[in-house]
Image (tube, rainbow, N blue to C red):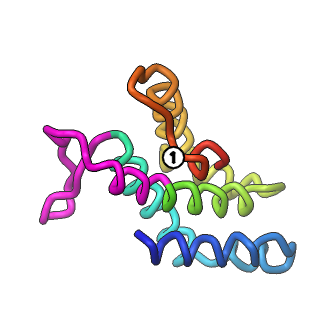
Amino acid sequence: HAWVTCWSTRLVKQSLQPEERQSFAEDEELLARLGDLLEHHLARLAGFAAEGDGSMRLQKEAPAPQVVAAHEEAAAACLKLARNLAVGNPEIQGRWWRRGLVERLAVQARCDLAAPSGERSAAWCEA
């Protein structure tokens, strides 16, 4: 998960420049990868784990805190990049809506607020 965080964080910084942001917003491979990473990490935060065939299944036991923290950090970095790319770009905004990422994020936020067991990391809350 560390590589996802590093990759996303580097791109977040670059995306603060309008010309870089536009270039990233036109890069279909980058957008597809970012969407896939967001889906994966949001699923993990919701309690799902990847199967060998690429499908996701609900975990029977809660993951270790360090595993959750790693997914929170990676998801937060990806969300910051997705947010930056969506600024002033209705096409990118629509892309995230069509993929269901905005809805999944809203569901995760509602679940986080309703959970009596604890808080999310600072990175996740900041994103």
For mark 1, what is the residue?
101
Position in image of residue 121 (x %, y %) = 53, 46
Q: Is 93 in front, or is 72?
A: 72
* Residue found at x 29% / y 41%: 47
Within 10 angstroms of label 1, few (less than 14), some, or many (20 or more) residues? some
Q: Does dot 1 land on a helix, a strand or a loop?
A: helix
Q: Is 19 in front, or is 94?
A: 19
* Residue found at x 37% / y 57%: 40
Quarter of the image that includes the N terminus: bottom left
Q: Is 85 in front, or is 12?
A: 12
- Name the image quarter holding residue 87: bottom right
Say whether residue 114 is magenta. Answer: no
Q: Is residue 65 left or right of residue 7?
A: left
- Return the residue found at the far right: 18
- Name the image quarter holding residue 45: top left
Name which residue type carries label 1.
Answer: Leu
* Residue found at x 83% / y 55%: 88
118 shown above or below 23: above
Q: Is residue 17 left or right of residue 25?
A: right
* Residue found at x 33% / y 56%: 67
Position in image of residue 21 (x %, y %) = 77, 72
Range shown magenta:
47-72
Q: Is residue 53 left or right of residue 94?
A: left
